[in-house]
Amino acid sequence: MKIINYADLSYPEVRELPRPWPVLVPLGLDHYDLETAARALSTEVIILLPAVPYGFQCDQRTPRSRLQVPPGLLERTLAGISKWLNIQGFQQVYFLNGHGEQKIKVTDYKLIDQPYLEPVELTWPENLGERVVLISTGHTEQHGYHLPLSTDSLIVEAIAARLQELAPDEVFCLPVWPFGVSTHTREFPATLNLGGRVFEDFFLVIVDRLIGLGADKIYFSNGHGGNHSFLVNVIKYAGENHPKAFIATEWLHTTGPELNKYRESAIGGMGHGGELETSYILHLRPDLVKMDRATREIEFAATQNYYMDWVEGGSLIANPPWSDDTTSGIYGDATLATAEKGRLWLEAAAQQKLSTIREIGLQQQLRQAKRALKS
């Protein structure tokens, strides 16, 4: 049996995959018996997508059940994952289910009841209220000819892991969520798109669940620009729903002074798949980077109030076709990337996150004190 990890590939490599091959998406980070699943599907090749780390119902009230969403919302979420696989021509999309009966409908995908070999449980702290809960949102999206689809997820996962090392008693990190929102799926294949409304609804319920478990400080660490506007909506609605909690997000990771300190490219050199993200993956997973295919695309149609870099600049907000400005799918200069810069940026981002985590804690303390004075 051959297993092809979809998110390890670049989008030109996904474009070449035979469409009759089955695509499997695990529910949970558990270790599944993929050979048994392959036999059930009468196949010798499996295309494996990133796992859905939480949101599903389990057969017992184990810690993994704490973040389940309603069946109808889970159905919309799974349908959002499978939709763009179907559009790309992958018609055999299956979700590996090792968690007992799921009360969800089967639409354009199928559930395979496949017991896992070894469960993977979240280790929950006794009191979530003493920590900031970090929710890392990545994506499975094209990053040019040279980077894997998992780029966004790999980076925020690494930042969260380093933050957990730096402040184990101050933060609780959920597994990275690898399915985000993109609006350029038709122009560059392999990119998925959960859909903005589904994304918002899903994480509003996750916030509800965390608040019910005692959390009162929640921080969305974002690795994908397309998620940002929808995360802002989540923050607004969640803040209204839970006024006693402090819930926050950011534009993107790595936005401190070190961003410009280590860069060699001019403005426009690290919009998407450029110097910054390529350096990160050269440091984290050099085996997934094909530097001989790295490109330099900095001819963005920039004006005073609208230009592209790591953080979009100017007063205009727009969403023109990506193909106006890029052939390979990137914005920026990937040829200037180095693993050493990736190492430096990772440490800088983690330290910045630690400062933000402590600021969130301070915000909650200040606001609780003001409310106490009014009561």
Image (cartoon, helix red, strand yellow):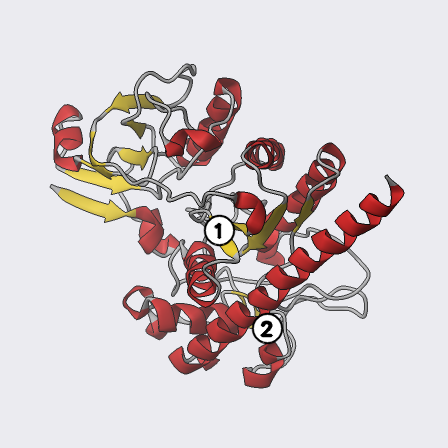
Q: Residue furthest right?
A: 374
Q: Residue at x 47, y 22 (%)?
A: 75
Residue designated by label 2: 298
Q: Residue at x 54, y 71 (%)?
A: 351
Specify whether 360 is left or right of 2: right
Residue designated by label 1: 172
Q: Residues within 10 Å of mark 1 (few under 14, many from 20)?
A: many
**Amino acid type assigned to the residue bearing label 2 in the image:** Ile
Q: Residues within 10 Å of mark 2 (few under 14, many from 20)?
A: many
Q: Nearer the viewer, residue 227 or 175?
A: 175
Q: Nearer the viewer, mark 2 or mark 1?
A: 1
Quick one: SS at disc 1?
strand
- As drawn, 210 above or below 136: above
In the rendered structure, which disc, 2 or 1, sits on the residue that comes first in sequence? 1
Image coords of residue 306 (percent x, y): 76, 64
Specify whether 269 is left or right of 344: right
Q: Residue at x 63, y 52 (%)?
A: 321
Q: Residue at x 42, y 65 (%)?
A: 165
Q: Nearer the viewer, residue 139 or 17?
A: 139
Q: Which quarter of the image is occupied by the N terminus?
A: top left
Per the rendering, the mark at residue 28 is none
**Can residue 146 be seen here?**
yes
**Amino acid type assigned to the residue bearing label 1 in the image:** Phe
Q: Nearer the viewer, residue 91 or 50?
A: 50
